[in-house]
Amino acid sequence: MNSTFTKIIRLILGLGLLFFGISKLVHFNFMPVHIYTGDAALFIDSLSNSGYILKVVAVFEVFIGLMLVFGKWVPFALLLLAPISVNILLFHLFLDTPGLLIAIVVIVLNIILIYKHWRVYRLLFR
């Protein structure tokens, strides 16, 4: 569970979540702005117009990223991340295919870490 491979995967996923979560809260000037089109633009605009949903998701991403980077409550962080990563995958699969590769990476890393911590989750399925 605490192999070097698992630690590297956990750090990559945690740092990625921190970066993308913080970038939703604070717009970095050095990053190119991705412009959504069509249905993806409508969806993102409706989330932005709500005033809180994207901020809540960003805070969750930062919180989960910190838990993964520091190695605290990792199984809990992975459970919190599961529905977020599924939604990231579905958004990019159906609305914004250029970001699909990153979405697949996030979900694969999450699945690997859940598999590595399966001993903890086994109790949930008794």
Image (cartoon, rainbow, N blue to C red):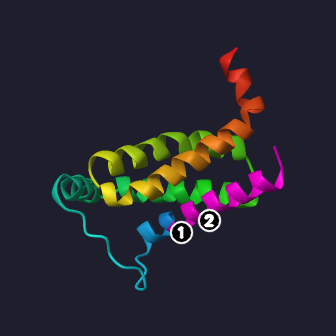
**Direction from residue 10 to residue 99 in the image, left or right:** left
**Direction from residue 14 to residue 27 in the image, left or right:** left
Q: Disc count in the image? A: 2
The three-letter amino acid code for the residue at tag 1 is Phe
Q: Position of residue 118 (x, y in %)?
A: 72, 32
Tell me the residue at 45%/71% (across/down): 23
Q: Where does label 1 land, which residue?
A: 19
Question: Can residue 71 be found in the magenta stretch?
Answer: no
For label 1, the SS is helix
Tell me the residue at 73%/46% (across/down): 73
Task: Quadrant for the N terminus, please.
Answer: top right
Contact? badges 1 and 2 (CB < 8 Å): yes
For the residue pair 16 and 65, the one nearer the viewer reads as 16
For the residue pair 113 and 52, the one nearer the viewer reads as 113
Dominant secondary-structure state across the stretch colored magenta: helix
- The answer for how far apart the CA atoms under marks 1 and 2 are is 6 Å
Which residue appears farthest toward the top when viewing the image? 126
Q: For residue 49, which quarter of the picture? A: bottom left
Question: Can residue 6 be found in the magenta stretch?
Answer: yes
The answer, for residue 71, to whether it is visible in the render is no
Q: Position of residue 3 (x, y in %)?
A: 83, 50
**Direction from residue 67 to residue 30 in the image, left or right:** left
Q: Where does label 2 land, which residue?
A: 15
Stretch in magenta: 1-19
Tell me the residue at 28%/59% (across/down): 48
Specify few, some or many for label 2: CA neighbours under 10 Å numbering under 14, 14-19, or 20 or more.
some
For label 2, the SS is helix
Q: Which mark is residue 37?
A: none
Specify few, some or many for label 1: CA neighbours under 10 Å numbering under 14, 14-19, or 20 or more.
some
The three-letter amino acid code for the residue at tag 2 is Leu
